[in-house]
């Protein structure tokens, strides 16, 4: 049977991490896989997470199944975090999933069930897993202009020109904040225009939120999402807790459906249960229980917000320091765009040859296309990184 299976292609990001681990050079830099690291190179456990986990461990009395929806306290806490005070809060449902990738697949299957001829529009470029997930669900995928490689900013005019042509059979997938892989976020005015176009043309927006709190702040980072939720009859949302709570390995996410009515959303939840039962049945509880414990305790929630704000502040500081070092070593301001980007990543546009040279000659691991994980950088390594980048012709 298995002789008919071709050798699998290496994942462009995960394989980079394996190569980094096998590299014996002492001064190597891992700026590939998207995890936050502190100045010592560690991905820390947030203090609020540790407190919540210890509480849960001491209070735990059972390991019984939770059900198809997962942890319902978590689901409600996440709906409150994202949609409280929105008119959509009373006509939405959420179910816990194995990470946001699980939520993406689940909602892709829901789209395919509700409208098999739907076309899902992705930004150019987009998160590496968006296209294969949508296509695995049997959906057609198309692309709208997004990132201008010259200005390193969002080409909003080209983006909106394409979006204005979408209709009732189209789904528009948007990054909630801290766009992956570019780091370039669109303006709130662009979000407003998208909301109006969705109302006029009837396409369905789908917001993937993976980095809340890594940009301008917990509330500010969902400004676009809230604008859509407040003004549109229907909306799909996926959310990850990997970055904002540091729960990478716990694979904690949620799939949210906002319907025209609560009954419509509830009908969608029933279909999601059916789809989940066909694959993973129910998600793991531990990460969701930790998030629920934090969000439902005002003191813990404040501690989490303070820690998250400190991480975001550190990333902004790294961006500023990196841009300044490029100015110093190159006598040019062409890397100043780094300070305008948000979140973990920036897309530099380095060529494949340059990223390979960085890896082979300098032990610097960057994803093909030149995506740098700013959040994985230590401040003391900035001169080393800049010197290598300029040496390969960046």
Image (tube, grey):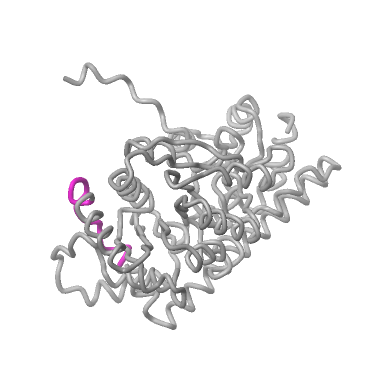
Query: Along the line of sight, which residue is nearer the eye, 75 or 215?
Result: 75
Question: Which residue occupies 28% across, 63% down?
Answer: 286
Answer left or right for 57 relative to 291: left
Location of residue 366 by image quarter: top right
**Residue 222 higher or lower than 386, as above or below:** below
Q: Position of residue 30 (x, y in %)?
A: 54, 42
Q: Position of residue 344 (x, y in %)?
A: 57, 52
**Residue 372 higher or lower than 341, as above or below:** above
Q: Does the segment drawn in magenta span residue 293?
A: no
Query: Along the line of sight, which residue is nearer the eye, 39 or 297?
Result: 297
Question: Which residue occupies 23% across, 51% down?
Answer: 276
**Residue 320 higher or lower than 8, as above or below:** below
Label count reads 0
Answer left or right for 100 relative to 180: left
Location of residue 259 by image quarter: bottom left
Query: What's drawn in magenta, residue-wise?
Result: 276-288
Q: Does the segment drawn in magenta span residue 282?
A: yes
Query: Along the line of sight, which residue is nearer the eye, 346 or 219?
Result: 219
Question: Which residue occupies 82% across, 40% down?
Answer: 330
Q: Position of residue 23 (x, y in %)?
A: 50, 33
Q: Position of residue 303 (x, y in %)?
A: 48, 77
Location of residue 125 by image quarter: top right
Answer left or right for 3 relative to 163: left
- Extreme right residue here? 331
Q: Quadrant of the N terminus?
A: top left
- Extreme top residue here? 3
Query: Along the line of sight, which residue is nearer the eye, 100 or 242?
Result: 100
- Extreme front residue here? 200
Q: Quadrant of the C terminus?
A: top right
């Amino acid at each position: 049977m298995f002789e008919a299976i071709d050798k699998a292609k290496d994942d462009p990001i995960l394989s980079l991490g394996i190569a980094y681990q096998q590299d014996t050079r002492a001064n190597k830099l891992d700026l590939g896989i998207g995890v936050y690291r502190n100045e010592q190179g560690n991905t820390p456990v947030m203090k609020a997470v540790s407190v919540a986990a210890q509480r849960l461990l001491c209070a735990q009395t059972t390991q019984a199944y939770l059900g198809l929806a997962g942890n319902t306290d978590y689901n409600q806490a996440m709906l409150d975090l994202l949609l409280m005070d929105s008119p959509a809060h009373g006509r939405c449902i959420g179910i816990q999933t194995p990470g946001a990738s699980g939520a993406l697949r689940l909602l892709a299957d829901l789209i395919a069930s509700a409208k098999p001829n739907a076309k899902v529009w992705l930004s150019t470029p987009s998160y590496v897993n968006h296209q294969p997930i949508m296509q695995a669900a049997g959906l057609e995928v198309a692309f709208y202009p997004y990132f201008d490689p010259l200005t390193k900013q969002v080409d909003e005019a080209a983006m909106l020109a394409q979006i204005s042509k979408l209709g009732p059979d189209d789904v528009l997938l948007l990054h909630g904040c801290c766009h992956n892989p570019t780091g370039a976020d669109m303006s709130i005015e662009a979000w407003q225009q998208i909301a109006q176009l969705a109302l006029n043309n009837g396409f369905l927006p789908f917001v993937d939120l993976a980095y809340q709190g890594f940009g301008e702040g917990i509330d500010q980072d969902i400004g676009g999402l809230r604008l859509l939720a407040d003004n549109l009859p229907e909306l799909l949302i996926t959310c990850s807790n990997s970055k904002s709570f540091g729960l990478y390995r716990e694979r904690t996410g949620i799939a949210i459906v906002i319907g025209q009515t609560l009954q419509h959303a509830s009908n969608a939840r029933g279909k999601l249960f059916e789809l989940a039962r066909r694959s993973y049945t129910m998600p793991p509880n531990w990460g969701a229980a930790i998030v629920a414990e934090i969000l439902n305790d005002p003191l813990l929630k404040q501690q989490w917000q303070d820690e998250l704000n400190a991480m975001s502040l550190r990333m902004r500081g790294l961006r500023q320091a990196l841009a300044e070092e490029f100015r110093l070593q190159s006598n040019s301001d062409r890397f100043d765009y780094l300070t305008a980007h948000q979140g973990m990543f920036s897309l530099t546009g380095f060529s494949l040859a340059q990223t390979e040279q960085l890896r082979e000659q300098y032990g610097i691991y960057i994803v093909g296309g030149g995506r740098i994980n700013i959040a994985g950088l230590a401040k003391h390594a900035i001169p080393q990184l800049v010197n290598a980048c300029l040496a390969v012709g960046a």
